[in-house]
Amino acid sequence: MHRSLGYAAKLIRKMQLQLDLLKQFEKQYNPNLIIHEWEQLPELRKNWVRPYEMADDEYAKQWIEEPYERKTQPTGPIHTTTNGETVRSKSEVLIAERLCHFGVPYRYEQRYYLKGMGNVHPDFTLLNKKTRKVYIWEHFGRVDDAAYWDYNIQKIECYATNGYYPGESLLMTFESLNHPITTQIIDSMIKRYLL
């Protein structure tokens, strides 16, 4: 018993030293050093110097400007976001507005090919600017409709067999007539995965 107390005391001292080193490192570490140095250059010089690492906002701007194949214009009821983008539902307007509010870059109904299903157009393709990870967001707005739900269960399974796993690279929200989507749910998804 006495020896184990000596071991624990030594271990605690050594772990405290490790913790102190980590705290010292954290105070001095600057993950934005490379970008900051480039941003301090005079504008004329920036034209001649290629940064080693692209700033998050610049990366996002290039990602947004990349052309992509989008589904054809919506037919039937069309809803418009404050950015003037046409979407297919009021819930998609709400999601798009919250994405804009938080500054999350997105593409609406970008085409993807899923083996076993063919071409699909998820509601949103999103970019986390900090991690540069791309996510797909599907909103299932008519879960009360059995035929709609049956098709979309197959779609979710196809996403998974093609490497888009729920909660990893595939984000999903749901609503029914009695349980509409809320900004609280949308915001929590954005904060969890995209900021």
Image: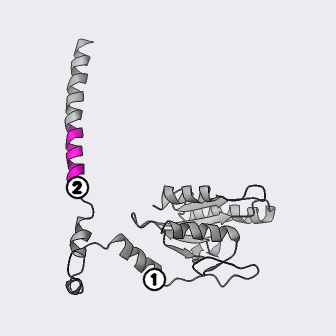
Asked whether 133 or 45 is in front, the reply is 45
Residue 99 at x, y = what percent? 54, 68
3 on left or right of 176: left
Q: Secondary structure at mark 1?
A: helix
Determine the residue positioned at 51% across, 62% down.
169
- 75, above or below 160, in the image: below
**The quadrant where residue 52 appears:** bottom left
Indicate the position of residue 121 as horizontal and vertical percent values: 62, 75
Quadrant location, the N terminus:
top left
Seen in the picture, residue 83 relative to 135 is either above or below; the reply is: below
Q: Is residue 20 magenta?
A: yes
Foreground residue, 168 or 124? 124
* Number of residues whose C-alpha sits closer than 10 Å to that of mark 1, classed few (under 14), some (14–19) or many (20 or more): few
Mark with earlier residue (1, 2): 2
Q: Nearer the viewer, residue 85 or 16?
A: 85
Residue found at the far top of this picture: 1
Q: Which is nearer the eye, 97 or 116?
A: 97
- The numbered mark at residue 65 is 1
Residue 67 lies in the magenta stretch: no
Q: Amino acid at mark 2?
A: Tyr
Which residue shows up at 52% across the image and 67% down it? 101
Label 1 – label 2 distance at C-alpha: 32 Å
Query: Which residue is tagged 2?
Result: 29
Give the x, y percent position of residue 37. Answer: 21, 71
49 sits to left or right of 74 = left
- As helix, strand or loop, the secondary structure at mark 2 comes to loop
The quarter of the image holding the C terminus is bottom left
> Could you classify mark 2 by the number of other residues whose Cα lies within 10 Å: few (under 14), some (14-19), or many (20 or more)?
few
Tell me whether circle 1 and circle 2 mark residues in contact (CB < 8 Å).
no
- On screen, 171 above or below 58? above
| Region of the chain picked out in magenta, as a range | 18-31
